[in-house]
Image (cartoon, rainbow, N blue to C red):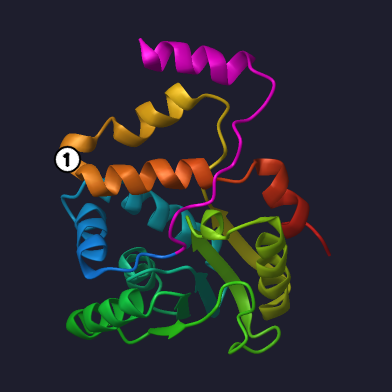
Amino acid sequence: MDFIVGIFEQVFKKDYIQRVPESEMIVETESELLSYNRSMREGGAAWPYIIYTAYFMSQSIQRCTHVLDIGCGSADLLMLVAKANPHITFVGVDQSDIAIHEGQKKILEEGISNVTLIQSNLTTLSNLNDQSFDGVISRFALHHLHDIQQLESASMSLRRVLKHGGALCIIDFKRLKSYRLMKYVAYRNKKNAGELVSRLFYESLNAAYTKMDIEKYLSRN
């Protein structure tokens, strides 16, 4: 019933729910990271979506040679995209040193040679050169930014490192209009995903920007 009511609210309500930034900007503890990673690996709750996203991103960057993944986490998705595109050199950046360390271990274990991971602040990307990439991808990273000011700063940094006319593929949550629908979506797969991952999902939906917010800054010249 909550799902049906939530759909009606999503369709007919005029205003979006108030945005609530996440309690933590990045995954801080090893237990959180392990729980999150389990859902992303083969057989995990998010695995079918990961496969679809990897395919969609791969189609977007076919003409690229150097691609940046913003907010790569521990690189589960990035490794799939890199394997599917051996002609491309990838750099993944994330603010979490725990995630970067975990990702580097997995890259070595998998023997992937076209991926480098770097810890970097997403709002500045200060350790990356101007126009150094002809493609940028990102999955579920922008909603981690605390406010509109950080979103604007991150968008400016993204445009700085991306060459003119480069490929851009950004995937993130969209802010909803219904709390019922948001809670249903976050917890509907709790049995497989677990309490922690479901809670993180719910917080992420709370922290999502509107489509208008994202387009306002990413579409600027």
**Residue depicted at 19% across the width and 44% down the height:** 194
Q: The residue tagged with tag 1: helix, strand or loop?
A: helix
Q: Residue 63: tell me if it is visible.
A: no
Please state the horizontal and vertical placement of residue 40, each as a whole percent of the image: 26, 56
Q: Which residue is mark 1?
A: 192
Instruction: Report the residue that reaches farthest toward the right.
Output: 221
Type of residue at label 1? Asn
Measuring 39% from the left and 58% from the top, which residue is drawn there?
Answer: 54
The answer to whether residue 157 is seen in the rendering is: yes
Q: Identify the residue at horizontal 51%, vertical 62% (top origin).
A: 138
- Displayed quadrant of residue 19: top right
Q: Name the spot of residue 128 as percent of width and height, x first.
A: 60, 87
Q: Is residue 186 left or right of residue 66?
A: left
Q: Position of residue 58 (x, y in %)?
A: 46, 61
Give the left or right position of residue 220, taking residue 31 as reference: right
Magenta residues span 1-25
Q: Quadrant of the N terminus?
A: top left
Kindly indicate the quadrant of the structure image that contains residue 66.
bottom right
Q: Is residue 147 magenta?
A: no
Magenta-drawn stretch contains 7: yes
| Label 1 environment density (alpha carbons within 10 Å; few <14, some 14–19, many ≥20) | some
Residue 57 higher or lower than 97, as above or below:
above
